[in-house]
Image (cartoon, grey):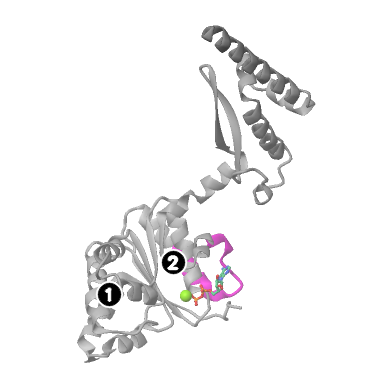
């Protein structure tokens, strides 16, 4: 008796499945959709509800108006059925547009930002303003840098000084993004904030942060000289970072509103007094690591 009940139950379940499948197929578009799937009907009937979800997403894709307007559950992905033996598995598959975007953005994983705005990852050399001639020597230097780096000739970094808002950070970020596209890891550090956060990480990941920056294949210390100088930041942070990078020929970039002479003065005065020798030593290291270019231009900030 128990068996018969089970059979009846099983049969009625199957009838139910068939009914709901047939119901769904009365929608011509849905029917067209499932006909394109290389899956037998006796398997399809067990998945009507998921197939309907999938159908809605495929329809959205057919009428795609761009990723920004994607109506699917997971933007850029389509809920897709795939037969595996006697079952159907559904998974979110990236559409062509999303795939292209993922490919184009793959370089971003080679960029480590420390307190820099995220948009800096979008800076590109081809967007660099060429409306003023002051950028020409910088662009020339960039080409040379990339060329030498490719040939493993250990090119020097750049100390880019100049007026506020002239585009120094943008320019170096554009170069580093280009390097990231060549699979070279770059760290972009907003130096004043990095010092603050480093200071508060003594109990936690201080060494990790410090070493990451010290050893990064390419490093930008952005806005150096804008921080409040202390003998600790000069002698325990900046000094050892530069020393290590010099010894290991690791390209290092700086942007600053200060010239090297002005930076030397700023570095010599700390809350613990005036120490010209230590400041001089830092400047010597920066000079070893970089060439200096000055960027004078109008303020691009709005
Ligand atoms: P700086 O570091 O010299 O103070 P920034 O690099 O921050 O200047 O540039 C100032 C502003 O101008 C930023 O908002 C930056 O995004 C923008 N900017 C600079 N150069 C470009 C460029 N080539 N294309 C688009 N935006 C730029
Ligand atoms: Mg800047």
Name the side, left or right, on which 17 lies relative to 106.
Answer: right
Is 294 in the magenta? no
Q: Position of residue 68 (x, y in %)?
A: 66, 52
Please tell me whether mark 1 sits on a helix, a strand or a loop: helix
> In the image as oriented, which residue stretches furthest toward the front?
1
From the viewer's side, name the closer residue of 188 and 176: 188
Residue drawn where x is 53% and y is 64% of the image: 119
Q: Which residue is mark 2?
A: 141
Q: Position of residue 21 (x, y in %)?
A: 70, 22
Q: CA distance from mark 1 to mark 2?
A: 25 Å
| Residue 38 seen by the camera | no
Task: State which region is magenta.
Answer: 123-143
The N terminus is located in which quarter?
A: top right
From the viewer's side, name the closer residue of 224 and 132: 224
Please tell me whether mark 2 sits on a helix, a strand or a loop: helix
Name the side, left or right, on which 37 lies relative to 148.
Answer: right
Q: Principal SS element in the magenta part? A: helix
Graded by Cα atoms within 10 Å as few (under 14), some (14 to 19) or many (20 or more), the crowding at tag 2 reads: some
Residue 50: quadrant of the picture = top right
From the viewer's side, name the closer residue of 172 and 121: 121
Does mark 1 have its CB less than 8 Å from ligand 2? no
Q: Which mark is residue 238?
A: 1
Q: Position of residue 6 (x, y in %)?
A: 55, 12
Residue 37: quadrant of the picture = top right
Q: Is residue 39 above or below residue 285?
A: above
Residue drawn where x is 33% and y is 88% of the image: 266
Residue drawn where x is 48% and y is 49% of the image: 106
Q: Position of residue 146 (x, y in %)?
A: 41, 58
């Amino acid at each position: 008796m128990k068996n018969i009940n089970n059979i009846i139950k099983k049969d009625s379940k199957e009838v139910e499945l068939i009914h709901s499948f047939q119901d769904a197929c009365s929608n011509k578009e849905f029917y067209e959709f499932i006909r394109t799937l290389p899956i037998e009907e006796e398997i399809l009937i067990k998945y009507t509800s998921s197939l309907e979800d999938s159908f809605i997403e495929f329809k959205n894709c057919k009428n795609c108006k761009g990723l920004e307007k994607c109506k699917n559950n997971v933007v850029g992905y389509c809920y897709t059925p795939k037969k595996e033996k006697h079952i159907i598995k559904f998974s979110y598959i990236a559409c062509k547009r999303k795939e292209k975007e993922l490919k184009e953005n793959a370089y971003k994983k080679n960029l480590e930002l420390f307190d820099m705005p995220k948009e800096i990852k979008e800076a590109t050399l081809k967007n660099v303003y060429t409306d003023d001639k002051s950028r020409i020597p910088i662009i020339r230097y960039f080409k040379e840098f990339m060329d030498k780096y490719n040939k493993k000739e250990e090119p020097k970094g750049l100390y880019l000084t100049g007026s506020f808002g002239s585009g120094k950070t943008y320019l170096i970020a554009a170069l580093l993004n280009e390097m990231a596209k060549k699979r070279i890891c770059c760290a972009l550090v907003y130096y004043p904030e990095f010092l603050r956060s480093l200071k508060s990480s003594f109990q936690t990941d201080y060494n990790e942060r410090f070493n990451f920056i010290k050893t990064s294949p390419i490093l930008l210390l952005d806005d150096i000289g804008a921080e409040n100088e202390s003998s600790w930041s000069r002698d325990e942070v900046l000094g050892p970072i530069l020393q290590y990078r010099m010894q290991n020929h690791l390209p290092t970039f700086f942007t600053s509103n200060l010239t090297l002479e002005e930076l030397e003065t700023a570095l010599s005065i700390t809350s613990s007094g005036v120490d010209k020798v230590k400041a001089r030593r830092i400047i010597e290291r920066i000079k070893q690591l970089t060439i200096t270019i000055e960027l004078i231009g109008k303020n691009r900030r709005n």
